[in-house]
Amino acid sequence: MRIGVNLVQYTDVQGIEIFAINMLHAAISDHTNDTFVLFVNDKSQKIFASLAAHNVVFVESPRGVLSRMRLLLLQQWWLAVSCKKNYIDILWCPSVAMPLWYKYKVVTIHDCADVRFPEEVSSFEAKIYLFLVHLSVKWRSLRVVTVSQFSQSEIAAVYSMLCNHIVVLSEGVPAIPAASENDRIWVEQKLGKKRKYFLYIGNIRPRKNIKNLLDAFALFIQKYPDISLVLAGKIDTTFFDVAAYSRCIHIENAVIQIGFVSDIEKSALYRGSIGFLFPSLYEGFGLPVLEAQSIGIPVLTSNVASLPEISGNGAIYVNPLDVKDIVRGIEIIFTDDAIRKTIIVAGYENIKRFSWSVGASQLMDVLHSTR
């Protein structure tokens, strides 16, 4: 079978790219009788270069400015035509970036954040595109796959689909590289040699609940003034200005934004932290939780959306809308060694439930049965 994969939209490595890389690596390795035709741009070809194998073909899109809108437009004409030229049996889209009118596709919907948090869809063009996505998913796609039972129920409600038409794939645990002495020195240089800190990794979109996290941390450091909060991820003030708000509530000396980090730097940050704080309002899955659990870092997360489903018993759960409850959870991780050890052990057990190979097998079953 010739399986096309739409990788035209991607220009850096975030959650969806990590999902696609790991799922494809397992699928390509385990299904050597299938040919995988990866449609890429010049940047995504580098991102996904590690997938090269005897049963993989890369097809690069016309070069040009890699703007979001241009890449979306490329998928509407170039990708649809290229699928026919390359005799594609079925096209897999790892996200809702897709050729809207091309029917022979399986679409991955990770969540319905665009509906639940419409304020995150800022441009008129994006709103129009997402409206067309809803039509395409319902009327011009052969199957839909997702990543959690929570997202399955969300998609069924938002798209008026039956749950049994939406297949849930198992995700796996992203590999976290070991941190060297040089990486630990990098952390010390960034944060200060003796600084103790909690860690957040992710973006600053409204659903991530950063304001409540900062408010909670402001209360926490009234009692524990020597502790810092490190936020790793792209520094973006589109929705919320972390630096300005930290100054407003007088915790600017305790909050450190360090921007985008590499996998090695992320590993060093995880390993040096007191705990990982992830009080998100809405997640379709929550890979960072599994990352932290996999290396024995205690996790605080929310009791909403997919997070209890994914985190299992390996986390302290809080109400993300209740600042005092977030403070309670942070203080438990900081002061209660017995509970801290319990959730670390439970985290190691929890990650055993997740497997990229199982997810890839589930995906391939869908692709093989669709055409």
Image (cartoon, helix red, strand yellow):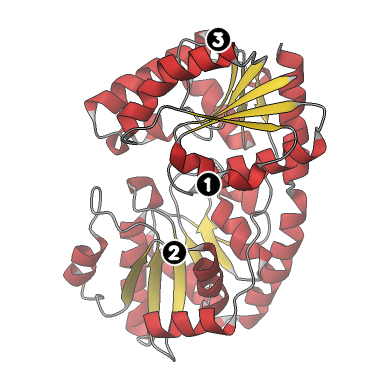
The answer to the question of whether label 3 and label 1 lie on touching residues, with beta carbons closer than 8 A, is no
Residue at horizontal 31%, vertical 38%? 120
Q: Which residue is mark 3?
A: 103
| Residue neighbourhood size for the residue with mark 2, other residues' Cα within 10 Å, grouped as few (<14), some (14–19), many (≥20) | some
How far, Cα to Cα, is label 3 from label 2? 38 Å
Mark toward the viewer: 3 or 1: 1
Q: Nearer the viewer, residue 31 or 198?
A: 31
Left or right of 134 in this view: 289? right
Q: Is residue 108 visible?
A: yes
Q: Which residue is mark 1?
A: 47
Q: Amino acid at mark 2?
A: Val
Residue 8 position (above or below residue 210)? above
**Structural crowding at the residue carrying mark 1, measured as other residues with C-alpha within 10 Å and reported as few (<14), some (14–19) or many (≥20):** some
Dot 2 corresponds to which residue? 261
Give, as a three-letter code, the residue at label 3. Answer: Lys
Residue nearest the viewer, comparing 75 with 340: 75
Distance, label 3 to label 1, CA atoms, is 27 Å
- Amino acid type at circle 1 is Ile
Q: Label 2's element? A: loop
Q: Residue furthest bottom?
A: 194
Q: Is residue 68 above or below residue 300?
A: above
Q: Which mark is residue 66?
A: none
Q: CA distance from mark 1 to mark 2?
A: 16 Å
Picture quadrant of residue 148: top right
The N terminus sits in image quarter: top right
Q: Give the percent coordinates (x, y) of residue 123.
A: 24, 31
Label 3 Cα crowd, 10 Å radius (few <14 / some 14-19 / many 20+): some
Q: Residue at x 61, y 13 (%)?
A: 142
Q: Which numbered disc, 3 or 2, marks the residue that appears first in the sequence? A: 3
Instruction: Tell me the quarter of the image containing the C terminus.
Output: top right
Q: Earlier in the sequence, mark 3 or mark 1?
A: 1
